[in-house]
Image: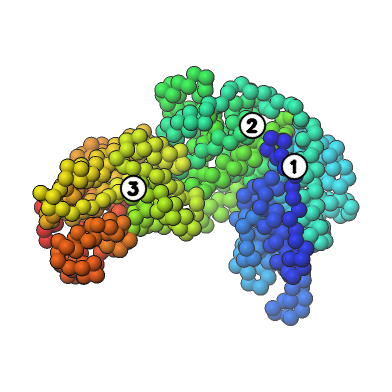
Amino acid sequence: MTAIMPKRLQNQWDAAKAAAMSEAQRLLYRSNLLGSDKRITNYGGGNTSAKVMEVDPLSGTLVEVLWVKGSGGDVGSIKMDGFATLYMDKLRALKAVYRGLPMEDEMVGLLPHCTFNLNVRAASIDTPLHAYVPRKHVDHMHPDAVIAIAASANSRALTQEIFGKDIGWLPWKRPGFELGLWLEKFCLENPDAKGVVLESHGLFTWDDDAEACYALTLQIIQKAMDWFEAKTAGLPAFGGALHHSLAPEARRDVAARLMPAIRGMVSGQQHMVGHFDDSDAVLEFVNAKDMVALAALGTSCPDHFLRTKIRPLVVDFDPAANDMEAVMEGLPAQIAAYREDYAAYYARCKHADSPALRDPNAVVYLVPGVGMITFAKDCATARISGEFYVNAINVMRGASAVSTYCGLPEQEAFDIEYWLLEEAKLLRMPKPKSLAGRVALVTGGAGGIGRATAERYLAEGACVMLADIDAEALSSARAEISGRFGADAVRAIQMNVTDEAAVMAAFAQTALDFGGIDILVSNAGIASSAAIEDTSLALWNKNMDILSTGYFLVSREAFKLMRVQGIGGSVVFVASKNGLAASPNASAYCTAKAAEIHLARCLALEGAEAGIRVNVVNPDAVLRGSKIWSGEWLDQRARTYKTDKDGLEEMYRQRSLLKRSVYPEDIAEAAYFFASDLSAKSTGNILNVDAGNVQAFTR
């Protein structure tokens, strides 16, 4: 365990700060502190509570209220509105109507009747576990060190050896009303106990003071960490190494090839997004002698299991041979075998009222010598699923070093995964956005049209790789957009579209960051204005290099990835009205833009059989936010039309049939249309967004 938890836990409680808080606010403070360290609990895992005296809004008298983390919350990021609040007298009254274990699920439906102050936050299934512990403050955490004890074959004996009488032990029981009663009984029979280890699950600690409860939780977890450090010092993890890791660059190359192939095979029900992890903890596990056997046992903690499925898929890759062709050839059979195994697990364990079989594909893919790949419906969930499996790795490391690791029994695992209450929660989730699970690469991503398009896609649930030659503008764009849509969904890479190696590297990075690509927006551009006799060969070539060759290079790499995935895709060229309508003193620019349009037509022919659609958006006079209008082009066009900078936009507006200005957001809307399923039956098309220009009417 020392490789994963080298530092001691730090007590971050600020007594002066906490003194000014209410009891409920101290609960929030405690929760956020506990959730800030993933050694204490994983994302979304565990929960906290406090029993607080509050003024009843009906009677005006003081009543005891349970504040407890609400359903689906995360203690590290929870706010005050993330807690459910319930009358304790009503929660205690529920015990009188409990009809026994076969009917315990119906108790969840009674929790809303206990709501205090019309709180809309739904109470979680863990509410009784906190309500019936006869202490004011309760922490339920999922620390890897304690779960390693809980998941050991001699879990009870290890708990007693490490903690003595301070911490008790309870056998596995699915979270719910019955377990809440078990905890109450334990507390009443062991009034001096400070907490309890739940087999295959986690840790409960309690106290009547918020700060003391926080300190106790840290103390118990640190004690487990120290014990593992002493017991496992010098011992090889997971039976020792069987494989050696490839060099970092080689690992990324392998992952970038594997991920689009896997993504294509697992995106049948919805597009999936990938995440790659080659951290030291992961590499130690995937390279180990006992990895395959341990991985087959599955995870133990219910929170781990719900995020990572019953077990991972171990990719048949030998890093010493590094025969990628053989691996890619065998991958479809491996994935098919996993699906068959998962379907068999469902058939063995299902009940008469079980929900239908869900997606049978693996979430976690372990690659010896390379690392771990995870796939989920969105980028954040893919990353978090990987983090959960790292938690599971830590648990397996500790348990297998001091005992025999035990995964959750298959039937218990199934009963949690296909729990009717869990199914009801899934059914309540909002409908996926129109681009959920889609991955887009946008060239010229730091400019006005590129940024507007990226934001439009992100608003519809896509992941976006921003590519631009301007490093400073790119960094600024990524920071601003990430602040709005989250860092998980936005990546950025400096790229010159005329540099073949840079373009190839950008697509490989996109595959590594997100698993593949569904949408290419080819938008990088320049503009030049000169009479033909003043147009130098260098200026001509610069236009052709960026606006023609650049569009060819990014399209070629997009096609390669899309064909590997086999799930189609959309290529959107941001060309120009000038590709259809001649313009004075701009022959190089107009000719290059015409080449873009004809390239798109050719690619539409080539991509159709693979479901790859290629369409063109033709803007005109998009001045606001556009980098090409911030330099010489603006001055040149103003001189060409004998006006000044201020009058140029008005001139363009009046020149249009509709007498309207065109903005980056207008182009983004057209780019969204061609990327989405709204245009699923459209390819080879040109959409002019120019407020009307008769010369650009397509014929």
Q: Which mark is residue 297?
A: 2
- Asked if the residues shown at circle 2 and circle 3 are in contact, with their CB atoms under 8 angstroms apart, the answer is no
Q: Quadrant of residue 403?
A: top right
**Considering the numbered disc 3 on the image, is that residue within a helix, a strand or a loop?**
strand
Q: Position of residue 126 (x, y in %)?
A: 69, 54
| Residue bearing mark 3 | 443
Q: Quadrant of residue 144?
A: top right
Kind of residue at disc 3: Thr
Residue located at (44% from left, 52% from top): 475
Residue located at (74% from left, 50% from top): 10
Please tell me which residue lies in front, 105 or 689: 689
Residue located at (77% from left, 35% from top): 229
| Residue bearing mark 1 | 146
Kind of residue at disc 2: Leu
Within-10-Å neighbours for mark 1: few <14, some 14–19, many 20+: many
Kind of residue at disc 1: Val
Name the quadrant of the N terminus. Answer: top right
Q: Nearer the viewer, mark 2 or mark 3?
A: 3
Please tell me which residue lies in front, 406 or 194: 194
**Considering the numbered disc 2 on the image, is that residue within a helix, a strand or a loop?**
helix
- Marked residue nearer the N-terminal end (2 or 1): 1
Q: Position of residue 22 (x, y in %)?
A: 73, 70
Q: Position of residue 258 (x, y in %)?
A: 44, 32
- Asked if the residues shown at circle 1 and circle 3 are in contact, with their CB atoms under 8 angstroms apart, the answer is no
Q: Marks 2/1: CA distance?
A: 19 Å
Residue located at (24% from left, 70% from top): 646
- Marked residue nearer the N-terminal end (2 or 3): 2
Q: Compared to 67, does 282 lie above or below? A: above
**Considering the numbered disc 1 on the image, is that residue within a helix, a strand or a loop?**
helix
